[in-house]
Amino acid sequence: MPEQQVKVKFEPHGRVVSVLPGTKILEAAAQAGLTIDTPCGGAGKCGKCRVRLITPKSGPNEAERAIFDENALKEGWRLACQTTLYANAVVSIPDSSLFGSRHQILATSETDQFHEIIPSVCKVKVALAPPTLQDDVPDLLRLEKEVGEFAADISMVRELSPKLRAEGFKGHAILSGNALIDFEPGEISNAIYGAAFDIGTTTLVGVLLNLDSGGECAVASRMNPQVSFGDDVLSRIAHAGKDAETLRELQEAIITEVNSMIEELAAAAGIPIHRIFEVAFSGNTTMEHLLCGIDPSQLGQVPFVPVFAHGLNRPACELGISIHPRGIAYVFPVIGGFVGGDTVAGMLATRLTEIEGPSFMVDIGTNGEIVLAHDGHVWAASTAAGPAFEGARISCGMRATRGAVEKVVFSDEVHCSVIDNGSPIGICGSALIDCVAELLQHGMVTPDGRLLPPENLPPSLPDAFRRRVQIKDNGDVEFVLADGVSLNQRDIRELQLASGAIRAGISILLKQAGISIHDLKRVLIAGGFGSFIRRNHAQRIGLIPPEIDHTKIRYVGNTSLSGARWALLSTDSRLHAETLARKTRHVELSNDPDFAMEFAMAMHFPA
Amino acid sequence: MPEQQVKVKFEPHGRVVSVLPGTKILEAAAQAGLTIDTPCGGAGKCGKCRVRLITPKSGPNEAERAIFDENALKEGWRLACQTTLYANAVVSIPDSSLFGSRHQILATSETDQFHEIIPSVCKVKVALAPPTLQDDVPDLLRLEKEVGEFAADISMVRELSPKLRAEGFKGHAILSGNALIDFEPGEISNAIYGAAFDIGTTTLVGVLLNLDSGGECAVASRMNPQVSFGDDVLSRIAHAGKDAETLRELQEAIITEVNSMIEELAAAAGIPIHRIFEVAFSGNTTMEHLLCGIDPSQLGQVPFVPVFAHGLNRPACELGISIHPRGIAYVFPVIGGFVGGDTVAGMLATRLTEIEGPSFMVDIGTNGEIVLAHDGHVWAASTAAGPAFEGARISCGMRATRGAVEKVVFSDEVHCSVIDNGSPIGICGSALIDCVAELLQHGMVTPDGRLLPPENLPPSLPDAFRRRVQIKDNGDVEFVLADGVSLNQRDIRELQLASGAIRAGISILLKQAGISIHDLKRVLIAGGFGSFIRRNHAQRIGLIPPEIDHTKIRYVGNTSLSGARWALLSTDSRLHAETLARKTRHVELSNDPDFAMEFAMAMHFPA
C-alpha cells in the first residue's frame, strides 16, 4: 500500500508535486525542480531560503521567529529549510530565494561583470539618412557606418535593401556577434528570443528567454527519444557507430524532438518560432556529438577522444534546428570524452572558479562528473558511477518515473514515497541511497556492505524493520521495502561500486591538486538527480565524504540548463565557458597509480 | 565582296584569328584576346613585345635588328609591334610578353609584395601524433595546435575525424582564410584549383588556375545567357525588377552557365570539380547583383545605390555555384551603382595606383568607366558611352560578331575586315571609330560632325572615296562601306555622343583632381572592346584626348579577368581590392556644374 501523500503547489511556477507528510518545503521544491538556495546548509540561520506559505496556516519555529518579524510571519513567510508539510499546501517562492536565479546572480555581480545581460544576439536601433545623389553610399556600407562592420549571408544581403526602404531607413538591426541576421523596419522594437537546452542522456529540458529582459517565458521538458536506441551513453555510441544511417537516425530523433520543444515553447509564449534568434545547447560529450550528427564512435574506444573541443557557433539550419532562418546554434565546449559541455555549463552557472577556497562540483547523473577548482586551477574527471543511481543493475531498480519509490524514511515504520502516488513497482537512485543509509544506521548492513541475515541483526532492532529482512528460497538475504520491491546483497554491492567510484574520484583529484579534504570550502551537488539526494544519507553511505561539514554542501540543481541560459544571455559568459573548458585539466582517473587502491577503500561504507 | 584575309594561329594558346593582310602581330594577338605588353607604346624600342614568328619566314626591320642578335632573328624572334602579317602565320608568344602575365608581375614585385602568390585557399601539410590516454586532446584542437585556430562548418566537423585517422593523422589541411574546408589524408599532396570569372554584360570568361603554382590550366568563354532578357544593363535591371520570379530567372541563367563553364574548365584540365576550392567573380555592379540573386532595381533609379559595397566572401553553395561542397565564392567589392567590381579588378590588375604620376584607366565596354589615380587619391566615374561602341543605335550597327566589319582602312581603296571572313552584314564599334576617323582625316566629315554631301567634298579627294558618298531617296547623305553597310549623319552624331561622354568624363575628373592633361603619365585602355580600337583613330575622333602623347597609351586587355585571377592567387590583392574600392571617390558626373559644358565641347571632333 502506498503511503498517504500531500500535494504541494509552488507559485508563481504552478508546479505541483506529491510528498510524504513531514517533508520540508526545501525538499518538496527540489522535487519540483526548484532549487532553493541554502547558504547555511539548511541550519535555519541565514534566512536565505525564505518562502511564503499561503496555505495551510502553520506556526513558525524558533529559527523562523529569529529571522522574521511578526508581520512577516502573519503573511506566511517561513524558511524552506525549517517548515515541514503535513497537509496539501500552496507555497510561493520569491525569485531571490532560488539558487542561480537571475536576481541573485545580478545582485552578486557588482564586482564581476561576466554575468551581465549582454546577449550574443542583440538589437541595434537604426535611423539612417536615405541615400541621395550627393550621398550614394551602398546600403550595406550605410548600415555599417551606424552599427559597425558586419558579415551577412547572401539571403540577408538580398533582403536588406527592401527592408531598409520599408520605413524610410529606420528600424532595428539584429546582430549575432559580427553577423547581421535580420533587419526589422519601423520605430517599434519587437522582443527577441533565445532558447536554452539541457540535452541529457535521459531528459531534455528547454527554456525560452526574452533576450531583451533576460526573463524566462516558458519551460518544456521531454524524454530524450534516443532512449529507444539504448539508455546509456555507451549503447548510443554503439548504435551510432553501426553505419551512417543509424547515426542519422539518432540525430534526427533528437533534432525532431528539440524542434517540437521549440514549437511548444514558442506557442506557450505566444510568439512565432522565427522570433527565436539563437539556441544554446549543453550536454555531455556524446549527446553533443549526436546532436550535431558527428559520429561518436571514437568516444567508445581508448583513448576516448572527442571530435571537437571549442564551442560550436553555427547557423542553426546546419543542425536542422528550426528557429529564425538565419538563427544561430551554440553548442557548449567540451573538456574530454566523458567530461562534456554540461560540466562546463555547470562551472559557468555556479561560478565554481570564483569561490574562495577549494571547491568541488559533483554532477551525479548517468555518469558522475567531478570538478575541483582552486586558486585559478581546475581539475575534472568522470567516473562510471551512473547505472546504479539511475536504477540500472539493481534488482528492483528503475528510473525516477511513475511508480518508483523515490524516498525511504525509517521512523516508527519504514515509510516509502512513490512518484505519482501509484503502487510501488521499483526503486530509484535517491531511495536506494536512503534505504542503504538507514540500513547502515540501524546496523542491518555492515560497513563492508554485508546485508545481515535475520539471526545476525542487532538485538535492539525494532520489529517493524526486522520483519522486512527475509531469506529467499535460494538462501539469499533480502530487505523488503514493499510488496514486490526489495533490496538484495548484489544491489548493495552495486551501490558500493557507484558511490566508491565517485568518492575515489574525489580523492584522486584532491591528491593531484595537493588539497586536504578538510580545506574544502564548498561541495556543490548538481544534476536533476542530485537534487533528490538527502545530504545526510549521501554522506552516510560515503558518496559524499563524511569528513565534509554538511553546511558546505549545496544543491545547485540543473546547472547544465542554467549554464546554457547564461550562454544565451551573456557573451562574456560564453567566452568564459571557452576559457573554463580549455583551462580545465582533464584527469583520466584510471591513469593515476593510486586510483585502484582509493577505489577499493572507497568501496567500504563509513563506519 | 569581303576582303581576302589571312589566318594567324597563336601558340601555345592555340587560338586562331583572321585579319587583314598588313595587320601587325600586336593587333592580331589582341583580336585573339592575348594582350601583348608594349611599354614603349609600340615604337619598337623597348623589346618587351618579343614573339617568335614560326611561319612564314619574313625579314626583320631596323628596330628588330637593334633588339635581337643574328641567332635570335634566325629562330624567328620578332617584335609584335613591328612585324606585319601578309600570309597565314603561326606565332608563338612567350608568357613574359603578355600584359599582366604572372612572370612579368612577379618580376616587378621585388619591391612590392602584394602580388606574391599566397592564395586565400591554402594547403598545410600536417603530421600529428595520434591521441593516447596521456594525450587525449580532441581532434579539432589537435589539428588547431598544428595549423592555428580555424572555424569549421558542421559538415567539416563530421568528416574530419575519419579523415584524420585514414592515414595515421597525416595529411593536408585545406584552409580558406580561417576556415577549415577539407582535410586530405596521406602524405601525397594533390594540387588545389580555383576559377576566376569576368562576368561581362555580354561575355563571360573564366580561367582555371592551379593554386599551388599559380599557373593557368584552362580558359572558357561564353555569351552571357542573360542577353536574351535584354542586351544592356538597364534592360536587365528592368526585367529583374518585375517580380521575384524574373529575378530568379536571371540569376539561374547566369549560375547555370557559370556551372557549365566550371565543368568545361575542369574537364579540360582533367580534374573533378570538387578539386576547385574557390571561385572569384568580377563584373559590373548590376552583373554582380544578378549573380548573387540580389534585386538590382535600385540601380535603375536615382540615386543608383548598390546594395553591397565590400567584397562578398561566402560559401559557393549560397550562390548555387558547384565546386567543392565547402568551396568559397568571392565577389569583387563595388564602388558605386555604375562603377563596379570589374573596375576595382582593373585597378588591381594594372596596379594603377602604383604608377608614378597621374594615370587614367578607361574601360570602354557597354558602359565607359573612367578611373584617375594620382598620389594615393583615386577618382572614378561612369559614362553612358556604351550603346554606340557596341553597335547599338547605329543604323547598320552590330556587335563584334560574325559578319561585322571590325576594321576599316582608307588607302588606295576603302578596305574592310570582316569577322570570320563572311559577307559584311553590319559594322561594329572599332570599325565605326576607324571609319569616322578616316572620314575626318580626309575632310569628308567636318569637326562639328557634319557628313558632307558630294558637292561639298574636298576637290582633291580620290574618286575611290568620293563615289561612296551618296544621297538617299529621302535626301540624306550616307557613306557606303560595303553592299548594304553604310554610315549616315545620325550614326556620326551617336558616335559624337558616346565619345564626347567619355572625353567629358576625363575632363571632369582631371578638373576635380586639379591635374592638367599634359601631366598625365599613362592612359590604360581596358576591356575586350578596348583592345580592338586603333589608338590613332581613337585620338583622331577625340575619344582619347589628342593632347596625350600616343606612347603613353597602352592596351591592358581584359583587366576584369586579370584582377579576378589575382584575387584568387593573393590574399594581399584581395585586401588591396577592398582598400581600392573604399578609397576611390565616386564622382557622379551629372552632379558637376561643368559637365554639361564639357560634354557639349567634347561633342566636337578635334580639328
Image (cartoon, coloured by chain):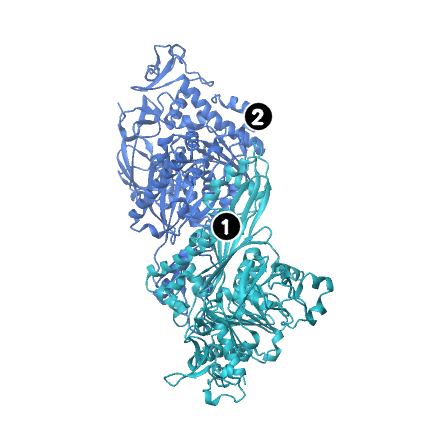
Chain colours: A cyan, B blue
Q: Residue at x 38, y 37 (%)?
A: B63
Front residue (pair A447, A107):
A447
**Residue B335 visible in image:** no
Q: Is residue B179 above or below residue B138?
A: above
Q: Can you tell which mark lies on residue B594? A: 2
Q: Is residue A294 above or below residue A604?
A: above
**Residue B593 visible in image:** yes
Which amino acid, mark 2? Asp
Query: Residue B82: x, y in percent?
Result: 36, 35
Query: Residue A289: x, y in percent?
Result: 42, 62
Give the structural element (helix, strand or loop) at label 1.
helix
Q: Quadrant of the C terminus of chain A?
A: bottom right
Q: Is residue B242 left or right of residue A151?
A: left
Q: Is residue A395 above or below residue B563?
A: below
Which image quadrant for residue A470?
bottom left
| Callouts 1 and 2 in the same chain | no
Q: Chain of mark 1?
A: A
User: Nearer the observer, disc 1 or disc 2?
Assistant: 1
Q: Which residue is mark 1?
A: A266
Q: Can you tell which mark lies on residue B592? A: none
Query: Residue B332: x, y in percent?
Result: 46, 43
Give the structural element (helix, strand or loop) at label 2.
loop
Callout 2 crowding tier (Cα within 10 Å): few <14, some 14–19, many ≥20: some
Front residue (pair B64, B182):
B182
Which amino acid, mark 1? Ala
Q: Chain of mark 2?
A: B
Which image quadrant for residue B219?
top left
